[in-house]
Image: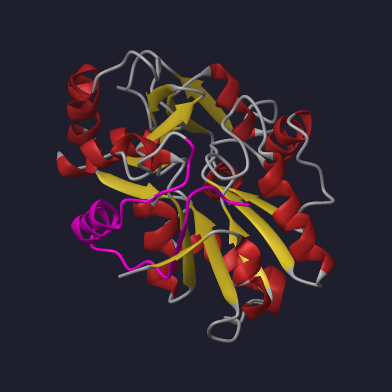
């Protein structure tokens, strides 16, 4: 059985740092959650470090701008990391000769290529995969409408060319307000299942946690039990914590809200039987559970 808590303050003094998810914990893409921000502010006031880690397929600067417009400014956190920034760094590292990238996702995500296009280090292709050297997936072309089957022919062509797919967002789905949309992780998982090579950037993979350790402890893994991972994704936030042997706090009012784990509309009761069944089904370990991060 997991430990259900009402507020973060019940356990916060155990930790020197938190790795906190953004979407579903601090905001829903439309508005931020004041109680969650107050919890982070109080933790920072007690000398705790707050690292926001998101599987957003955009550079850090873009996400900073987005969340600041939602009222999440730098008084609430010490560091921000994005899976998009890691993807950008990797592409910049390998594009020694001009690289042709088949980009799957919106044009807004071309920001991860930063100056690489202007410097003619890369070229972007969105229609024809034949001449591509690499696939970069940031999101489905139409996240709210696309089906996995829409990409089968493209992926088959990519696999025939032995192209590696870089996944800039391992999340499978995201809730934008009350609308659920497919993410790049669903497409990347399909490509891998079809036999393609995939490199994932972000949670639950070690590459993004290494950046946290570099910030907190010059690259060395911090003392066991000193970091808490907070998130609403069992297969990203919680699995990442498990992989890194870090403590975890699951927010059930985020992605899991459609699983009916919270029984009453007044947000008072968690169905612990359903919760434990859900956790067991996903084969993860959860240290603490909270309805909404606050």
Q: How many marks?
A: 0
Residues 13 and 132: in front is: 13
Residues 268 and 245: in front is: 268
* Magenta-colored stretch includes residue 272: yes
Give the answer, above or below, for where 40 lies relative to 119.
Answer: below
* Magenta-colored stretch includes residue 279: yes
> Going 37% across and 61% down the picture, which residue do you hit?
239
> Going 42% across and 62% down the picture, which residue do you hit?
240
Which image quarter holds the N terminus?
bottom left
Percent across and percent down for residue 241 are 44, 67
> Going 52% across and 40% down the picture, which residue do you hit?
24
Residues 25 and 210: in front is: 25
Quarter of the rendering containing residue 136 = top left
Image coloring type? secondary structure
Q: Is residue 42 visible?
A: yes
Query: Would residue 91 appear left or right of 250 to someone viewing this image?
Result: right
Q: Is residue 134 visible?
A: no
Percent across and percent down for residue 234 are 36, 53
Give the answer, above or below, for where 93 lies relative to 146.
Answer: below
Give the answer, above or below, for where 198 lies relative to 112.
Answer: below
Give the answer, above or below, for where 48 lies relative to 128.
Answer: below
Quarter of the rendering containing residue 212 = bottom right
Percent across and percent down for residue 117 are 63, 27
Percent across and percent down for residue 273 are 24, 57
Q: Which residues are magenta?
A: 266-294
Residues 290 and 91: in front is: 290
Query: Would residue 193 appear left or right of 175 to someone viewing this image?
Result: left
């Amino acid at each position: 059985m997991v430990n259900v808590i009402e507020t973060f303050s019940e356990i916060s003094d155990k930790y020197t740092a938190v790795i906190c998810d953004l979407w579903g914990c601090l905001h829903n893409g439309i508005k931020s959650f004041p109680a969650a921000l107050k919890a982070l502010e109080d933790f920072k006031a007690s000398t705790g470090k707050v690292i926001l880690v998101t599987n957003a397929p955009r550079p850090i600067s873009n996400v900073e701008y987005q969340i600041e417009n939602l009222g999440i400014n730098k008084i609430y956190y010490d560091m921000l990391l994005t899976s998009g920034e890691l993807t950008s760094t990797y592409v910049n590292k390998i594009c020694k000769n001009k690289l042709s990238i088949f980009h799957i996702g919106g044009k807004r995500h071309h920001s991860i290529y930063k100056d690489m296009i202007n410097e003619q280090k890369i070229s972007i292709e969105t229609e024809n995969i034949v001449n591509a050297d690499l696939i970069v997936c940031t999101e489905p072309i139409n996240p709210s409408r696309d089906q996995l089957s829409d990409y089968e022919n493209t992926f088959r062509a990519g696999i025939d060319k032995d192209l590696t797919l870089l996944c800039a967002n391992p999340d499978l789905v995201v809730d934008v307000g009350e609308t659920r949309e497919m993410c790049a992780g669903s497409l990347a998982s399909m490509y891998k299942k079809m036999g393609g090579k995939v490199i994932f950037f972000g949670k639950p993979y070690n590459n993004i946690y290494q950046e946290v350790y570099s910030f907190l402890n010059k690259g060395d893994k911090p003392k066991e039990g000193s970091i808490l991972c907070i998130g609403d994704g069992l297969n990203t936030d919680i699995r990442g914590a498990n992989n890194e042997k870090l403590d975890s706090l699951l927010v059930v009012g985020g992605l899991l809200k459609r699983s009916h784990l919270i029984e009453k509309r007044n947000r008072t009761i968690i169905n612990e039987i359903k919760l434990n069944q859900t956790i067991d089904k996903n084969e993860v370990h959860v240290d603490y559970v909270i309805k909404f991060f606050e």
